[in-house]
Image (cartoon, helix red, strand yellow):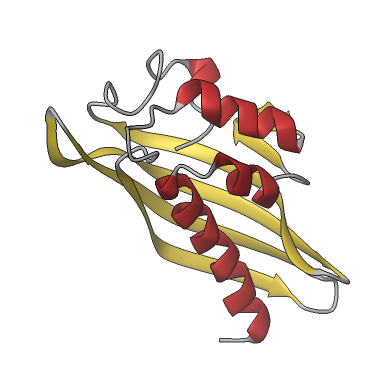
Amino acid sequence: MTDASVEVANLMARYTESIDAGDFEAVADLFGRAAVGVGEDLLRGRDAIRDLYVATTRRYPDGTPGTKHVISNLHLEIDEEAGTAAARSYWTVLQAVPGLPLQPILAGRYHDRFARDGEGWYFVERQYLIDLVGDVSHHMLGGLGPARAGHP
């Protein structure tokens, strides 16, 4: 793996750590320069992204959503010379909270784009493709409607 591959993969891992910790400020920092969402319904801007997570993700007394986001089947395309990268991956969200035993609640794919500047690599775009939906009643505030589908 190249240094760029590791750095891009680490960005993706920082998202999973941040969302599972309930740290929506860190999520917003990661996506602050990106367009994020489902299909053509993309959200832009750090504060708008943070506000979406706050408004739609249930957090428990420990401050977390009781989830584990797992990324697999990672495929990276890095153009070192241009300072751009793309990634496709699968994601699965597991949850275990009072009233819900451990189980997968969502699964799908990420299509990500990245760029590099003098400070390093950053997200340019994250497209969520939702393939499987289980019991999200303990995770999503207000259900998983089309307008809320932009942040597994």
Identity of the residue drawn at 44% across and 38% down: 152
Which residue occupies the extreme right position in the image?
A: 118
Left or right: 103 in relation to 28 = left
Identity of the residue drawn at 83% across and 69% down: 119
Tell me how many marks there are: 0
Q: Where is residue 63 shown, x and y percent of the image?
A: 40, 39
Query: Which quadrant of the structure image shows residue 37?
Result: top right
Is 6 above or below relative to 136? Answer: below
Q: Where is residue 90 shown, x and y percent of the image?
A: 40, 53
Q: Where is residue 94 shown, x and y percent of the image?
A: 26, 45
> On the rendered image, what quadrant is the N terminus found in?
bottom right
Q: Where is residue 49 shown, x and y percent of the image?
A: 65, 33
Query: Which quadrant of the structure image shows residue 136?
Result: top left
Left or right: 8 in relation to 66 = right
Identity of the residue drawn at 40% across and 13% down: 142
Left or right: 105 in relation to 42 = left
Left or right: 146 in relation to 59 = right
Identity of the residue drawn at 42% across and 35% down: 130
Query: Which quadrant of the structure image shows residue 66?
Result: top left
